[in-house]
Each structure stands twice: as C-alpha cells, then as structure tokens.
Image (cartoon, rainbow, N blue to C red):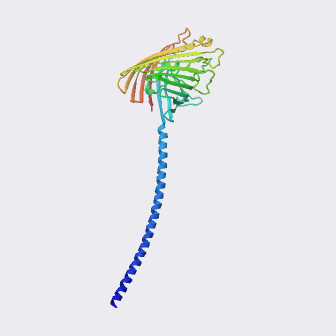
Amino acid sequence: MKKTLLASTLFALFASQTAVADTETQELRKVIEQQQKVLAELERRLEQTEQRVESTADVVEQTAAKTSSTTIGGYGELHYNNIKNNLNDSTKKEFDFHRFVLFFGHEFNDTTRFFSELEVEHSLAGEGKNGEVEVEQAYIEHDFSQNASGKAGLFLMPVGIMNETHEPDTFYGVERNPVEKNVIPATWWEAGLALNYQAAPGLGFDFGVTSGLNVPTEGSKAYNIRSGRQKVSNAKGDDLAYTGRVKYTAIPGLELAASAQYQSDLTQGAASDTASAVMLTAHAIYSIEDFTVKALYAQWDIDGADAEALGRDEQNGYYIEPSYRISPEFGVFARYNEYDNAAGNSDDTKVTQTNVGLNYWLHEHVVLKADWEQLGGSKDSDGFNLGVGYQF
C-alpha cells in the first residue's frame, strides 16, 4: 500500500512538472517568435537606411564633382590720380574704383570648358554715370588634341602684352601703359572663332576670325582706333577681322611675340570711302633673375582719303620698361612711352609719357602701387598716382 501511494505521488509530481515545462516552452517560443519579428523589422529598416545613405552619398559625390568643376575668381583696382595739366593750369585729383571683375568658369570634362569675365568699371553704371557693366569674356574652349585647341564665343584678342594678362598684380604702375591702351587698343575683345596650335614646346600659333572695329567717321574721334571698339554690343558685322599671332617662349626667361590683323573696312560701310586696315605689333620680354625688361611696338596702317586727310591713316607707338624685383615684396620700375594717333600728318601730335615708381606686394596677389608721371609732346602734365589691386 505504501509503495502504491509513493508511486502515485511521484507520478503526479512528474506530470505537474511536465505540464509546467510545456507551458514555459510555449511561452518561450512566443518570445522567440516576437524577437524574430522584431529582428526582421530591424533588418528591413537597416536596409532602408543603408539605401538612403548610399543615395545621399551619391548626391554628395555628384555635388562635390560639380563644385570642383566650377571655379570663381576675380580682380579689382582702386586708383588715386593727382595730375596737373600745365597747359591750362588745372589739376585732376580723383579717386576711382576703376575695375571690379568676377571670373566664372566650368570644366565640363577634360577637353571642354567654359570661361567668363564680368566687369564693372568706375563703380557706377547707367544713364549719366561714368561707368559700364561689361561682359569681357564668355567663351567655350575645346581641346582637339594635345597640341590643338579652339574657342567659340567672346574672347580677348591675341595681341600685345597686356591685352590677355592685365590683372593688377601682374604689371607695374597704377595705370596701364598708354601705348597698348591707345594704339592696340587694350583691353580689346571680339566675338568669333579662334584656334591655337602648339607646334613645338614654346612655339605657338593663334588664328581667329571675329567681329571687327567700327570707328567713327566724324568728330574729334573720327578714325580713332580705341573709339572703334564695339565690345560685342549689337556689333555690326559687315566686315570681319582676321587676326594671327606667333609666340615663342622656348628659352627660359624670354618671350617673343608678333601679331597681325586685317579688316577690309574699319567703318563697317558707314563711310563712302572704304578704310581697309592692317595692324602689326611685336613685343619682347626678357627676365634674368630679378631684372626684367619689356619692349613693345604697335602700328596701324589705314587706307582711304578720309583717314589720310585727318592724319589718322598712320597710328603707332612703342614703350620700353625695365624693372627690378628688390625682394619678394618690393619692385621698382621705369617706363618710357611714345605714341601718336595721327602720325600721318605733319602736325606734332606725338605724346610722350614717362612713369617711375614701385610696387609693394602684401601677398603674391595683393599689391600697393605708387608712381610719378610726366607727359610731354602735344601734352604737358605731371603728377603722381596711387593704387591698390588684387586678384584671386
């Protein structure tokens, strides 16, 4: 009897423990199933997050690529002129923020790029104001090969020293030299097509077909070259201009270049007398250590009785400029200029100009300038100029 009772008790106890174990197992399974659902949801959300991160990374990479392909820059210069005119005993004392320029460029790929230059002259532009807002460059450039490239759009003409490179930290003197200003005439840009070919290291050729000059035919500026710049503003295109240049830089420290342009009629058909014209210019730059000397000559020959009657069938000029870089910060220079926009007549219309001064570079691209100036010949004045310029 006792054995039977003990066996019954043990069986009941085992049965109850088994029931408890089954209940706990079922509950554990439920917990595991819930955790599996949670893990599955977490995996789904993680996958979505990874996709978003990848998409964001792609956008960031694309934006970074676009940003690195687009460039911005600019330059500017403030001038103070104190010049006495000895012919009428008047004195010019003037502050002028002469130029504020912004560059925008974009590289589409390794062979095709865009460049532009927007300029505000004399701070204010508009009716009755002294200044202008100008698009000085806006062109597409494409490399056809390692040695050949082309431009299409609005670009600077390949003539002289300063026409293509005129940022204030790159030259001596507050004002740009009068020969390139009045004879070439810098800064000079046109619209059209241009090709550049590098025939050998240090030997390049440029050729362009562009819009041309349109000189006045009446008044005090008749047949004046600088007054003929149309600046690609509804520019008349009856007569195109053809320009070529050869440039040699194979010897370290030496640059030699010569340019020529032909236009069949500088008046764009406005005069009864056709005024075909040829421009020739040549320059040399030689640097040895800290000493540099620059020399340039430019001339225009204009056919036609009207231009000849005014003496403007011949216009020419030259300058020579030695300079010495005393230190990375200081440099001194002297420049002698001579030009004549009516060299074809017997009158004494030649102008001479002498400048002596110094540049002080606060930074490679930030410069303070001062120079003394004297004009002679058909003009008579003297005084000094101060300036500050930058580029970035």
Quarter the N terminus occupies: bottom left
The answer to whether residue 357 is left or right of residue 131 is left
Whole-percent x, y for residue 289 in the image: 35, 22
Determine which quarter of the picture holds residue 354.
Answer: top left
Whole-percent x, y for residue 268 in the image: 63, 20
Return the residue found at the far right: 272
Quarter the C terminus occupies: top left
Determine which quarter of the picture holds residue 125.
Answer: top right
The answer to whether residue 301 is left or right of residue 253 is right
Closest to the observer: 341 or 237? 237
Closest to the observer: 143 or 183? 143
Closest to the observer: 170 or 130? 170
Residue 57 versus residue 74 in the image, above or below: below
Whole-percent x, y for residue 233 in the image: 60, 27
Quick check: can you spot residue 280?
Answer: yes
Residue occupying the point 47% across, 30% down: 76
Whole-percent x, y for residue 332 in the image: 39, 21
Quick check: can you spot residue 90?
Answer: no
